[in-house]
Image (cartoon, helix red, strand yellow):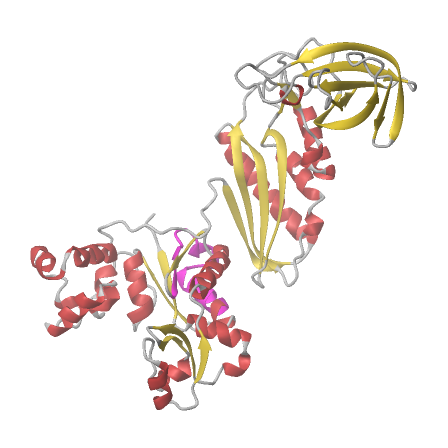
């Protein structure tokens, strides 16, 4: 299948945007200007001002001489790029590959998309009608190459759709600037009387290179499809993505559920063929009012079970507001992993067969209370308590070391909490300690167990840990920081035993 491109030209991009904000400017002549070398220079012109003979690059004072009632507004340098980026994202409902073409255009790779609108003509007509409905004056061209589509959108007089393989015939009657040539080259061509592409395109390539530079040959080759031209999508297409346009806007929850189930089945079928499963999934709904509604889910292990994935989405569908209707559904899987035949069980200390039911249960719980509330830890190679464990990213993560055999609290504070203690002798465990205003009387105690930083670090003082039990039978893990010979010795609570 050959590539097909659409180039869209916004003839008055920023001034049309101003009119959207201030409808009273619709029939008035106005310009957007910015200071340049001590003068106010026109950067954008409205349609009525352009009809009066005002062009970009003119000085505002000269423009007022032509049109005394001309209104002048400040030009925002970054506004064209902001507008084009937003419009390119909106165009994703028509194609997954949309790029901005500074300063006033878009380039769309529409390969394989027009058949969803029953052909290229209805496709282009619908796209332009929507953009014009937003208040933008636009022209467009469709062709096999970006160069020809660009040329037709700005200089074409006949049909805006160039049939496959007809690039040469389409550009022959156009002026040289239609090839996106640099201004000095265009001026040189005009001085030689070459006012159409047909006048010079068939000249020997050596002569063209010698007189007009290599860039001229490159632009000709790009327009004819003899040299590849790449675009940078504003939203790079996800490698795992499924799309489902709707013939009529969808407004009901039932319709959204049907679309989601169909996309999940399509996605899971593809993943099954590649022996993979998804870890993260995003469901996007493009509304006809340009708003994008989306919900997402995550799984604890790779999954391609469409029924299970739908259950995770089901509780979130109520968050989607269809408003006037949804015209495009997109399902993306940003994180995809190999789905092996054997996975590590949830809490087992040794490898076992895959426990899909446990993983799906975790996904359901995570969907209800939040993924950050369900955590699994594995041992880490470190004797320092707060560094002796790591968070597992998935059920398939395996431990690379054993848990220590030394008694450790089931609840370990990430940051030790300071306490006030009463000790009979400096190197004895405390008789009393106060934590967050509560006084605890120690009935039993074991220790100390001394822990020091590795020799290659030696950061901070060593710790002497004690296991103590208070009058209510609750066991705590306390430590004294530093030597007993130090008058500034401190005590901390670091954990609680079950």
Is residue 418 found left or right of 235 in the rendered image? right
Is residue 454 found left or right of 159 in the rendered image? right
- Quarter of the picture holding the C terminus: top right
Q: Residue at x 50, y 43 (%)?
A: 241
Residue 154 location in percent, x, y?
Answer: 32, 69
Is residue 67 found left or right of 241 in the rendered image? left
Q: Nearer the viewer, residue 168 or 181?
A: 181
Q: Which residues are magenta?
A: 104-130
In this view, 58 is above or below 13 = below
In this view, 12 is above or below 332 = below
Q: Residue furthest right?
A: 471
Residue 126 location in percent, x, y?
Answer: 47, 65
Quarter-of-image position of residue 164: bottom left
Residue 342 location in percent, x, y?
Answer: 58, 18
In this view, 135 is above or below 161 = below
The question of residue 66 being in magenta is answered with no
């Amino acid at each position: 299948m050959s590539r097909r491109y659409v180039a869209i030209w916004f003839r008055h991009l920023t001034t049309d945007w101003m009119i959207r904000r201030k409808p009273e400017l619709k029939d008035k002549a106005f310009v957007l200007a910015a200071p340049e070398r001590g003068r106010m220079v026109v950067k954008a012109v409205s349609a009525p001002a352009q009809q009066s003979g005002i062009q970009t690059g003119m000085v505002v004072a000269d423009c007022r001489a032509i049109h005394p009632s001309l209104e002048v507004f400040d030009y925002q340098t970054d506004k064209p790029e902001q507008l084009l980026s937003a419009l390119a994202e909106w165009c994703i409902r028509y194609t997954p590959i949309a790029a901005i073409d500074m300063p006033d255009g878009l380039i769309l790779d529409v390969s394989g998309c027009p058949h969803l609108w029953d052909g290229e003509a209805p496709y282009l007509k619908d796209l332009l009608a929507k953009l014009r409905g937003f208040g933008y004056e636009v022209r467009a061209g469709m062709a096999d190459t970006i160069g020809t589509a660009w040329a037709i959108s700005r200089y074409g007089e006949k049909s805006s759709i160039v049939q496959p393989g007809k690039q040469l015939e389409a550009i022959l009657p156009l002026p040289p600037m239609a090839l996106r040539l640099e201004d000095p080259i265009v001026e040189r061509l005009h001085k030689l009387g070459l006012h159409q592409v047909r006048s010079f395109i068939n000249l020997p390539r050596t002569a063209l290179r010698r007189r007009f530079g290599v860039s001229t040959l490159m632009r000709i080759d790009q327009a004819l499809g003899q040299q590849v031209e790449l675009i940078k999508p504003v939203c790079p297409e996800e490698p795992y993505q499924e799309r489902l346009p709707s013939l009529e806007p969808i407004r009901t929850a039932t319709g959204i559920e049907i679309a989601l189930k169909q996309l999940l089945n399509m996605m899971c079928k593809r993943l099954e063929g590649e022996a993979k499963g998804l870890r993260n999934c995003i469901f996007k709904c493009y509304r006809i009012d340009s708003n994008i509604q989306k919900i997402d889910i995550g799984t604890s292990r790779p999954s391609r079970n469409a029924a299970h994935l739908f259950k995770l989405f089901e509780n979130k569908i109520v968050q989607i507001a269809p408003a006037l209707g949804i015209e495009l559904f997109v399902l993306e899987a940003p994180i995809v992993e190999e789905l092996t035949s054997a996975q590590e069980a949830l809490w087992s200390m040794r490898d076992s067969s895959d426990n899909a039911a446990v993983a799906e249960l975790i996904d359901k719980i995570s969907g209800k209370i939040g993924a950050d509330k369900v955590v699994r830890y594995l041992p880490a190679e470190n004797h320092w308590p707060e560094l002796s464990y790591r968070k597992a990213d998935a059920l398939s993560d395996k431990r690379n070391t054993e848990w220590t055999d030394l008694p450790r609290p089931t609840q370990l504070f990430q940051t030790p909490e300071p306490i006030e203690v009463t000790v009979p002798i400096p190197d004895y465990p405390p008789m009393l300690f106060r934590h967050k205003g509560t006084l605890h009387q120690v009935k039993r105690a074991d220790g100390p167990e001394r822990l020091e930083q590795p020799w290659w670090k030696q950061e901070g003082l060593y710790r002497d840990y004690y296991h103590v039990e208070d009058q209510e039978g609750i066991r705590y893990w306390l430590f004294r920081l530093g030597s007993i010979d130090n008058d500034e010795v401190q005590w901390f609570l670091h954990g609680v035993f079950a």
